[in-house]
């Protein structure tokens, strides 16, 4: 299993555990808030690079 697949499986597992332990709105806030906060901590040049890489992968 690739490294990205392991991370995805771990993320799904954490999401399911959060849904069981917390109210659905709190779990949703965490699931959406953590990646948004991580994106906002990037420098503008890092954000441009990330957007450029994502566009290239869509082709």
Image: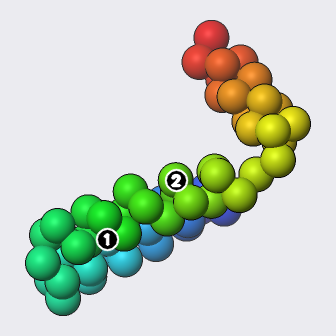
How far across and how far down the image is residue 9, in percent? 44, 66
In the rendered image, is residue 38 in sight? yes
How far across and how far down the image is residue 22, in percent? 18, 83
Q: Secondary structure at mark 1?
A: helix
Give left or right: position of 46 versus 19: right
Furthest residue to the top? 59
Furthest residue to the right? 45
Choose top left, top right, bottom left or bottom right for residue 31: bottom left
Nearer to us in this view, 6 or 50: 50
Mark 2 or 1: in front is: 2
In the rendered image, is residue 12 in sight? no
Choose top left, top right, bottom left or bottom right for residue 19: bottom left
How far across and how far down the image is residue 50, in percent? 74, 36
Residue at 62% from the left image edge and 11% from the top image edge:
59
Q: Secondary structure at mark 2?
A: helix
Give left or right: position of 41 versus 30: right
Residue at 62% from the left image edge and 59% from the top image edge:
38
Q: Which residue is mark 2?
A: 36
User: Label 2 crowding class (10 Å Cα cut-off): few <14, some 14-19, many 20+?
Assistant: few
Q: Which residue is mark 1?
A: 15
Query: Relative to 47, does residue 59 appear above or below in the rendering?
Result: above
- Mark 2–mark 1 distance (CA, rounded to whole Å): 16 Å
Quadrant location, the N terminus: bottom right
Marked residue nearer the N-terminal end (2 or 1): 1
Give left or right: position of 31 versus 8: left
How far across and how far down the image is residue 47, in percent? 75, 38
User: Label 1 crowding class (10 Å Cα cut-off): few <14, some 14-19, many 20+?
Assistant: some
Residue at 37% from the left image edge and 77% from the top image edge:
14
Q: Which mark is residue 27?
A: none
Choose top left, top right, bottom left or bottom right for residue 27: bottom left
Query: Relative to 54, does residue 27 appear above or below in the rendering?
Result: below
Give left or right: position of 33 versus 57: left
């Amino acid at each position: 299993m690739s490294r990205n697949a392991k991370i995805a499986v771990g993320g799904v597992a954490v999401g399911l555990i959060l849904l069981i332990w917390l109210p659905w709105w709190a779990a949703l806030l965490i699931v959406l808030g953590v990646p948004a906060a991580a994106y906002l901590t990037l420098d503008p040049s890092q954000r441009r690079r990330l957007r450029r890489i994502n566009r290239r992968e869509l082709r």
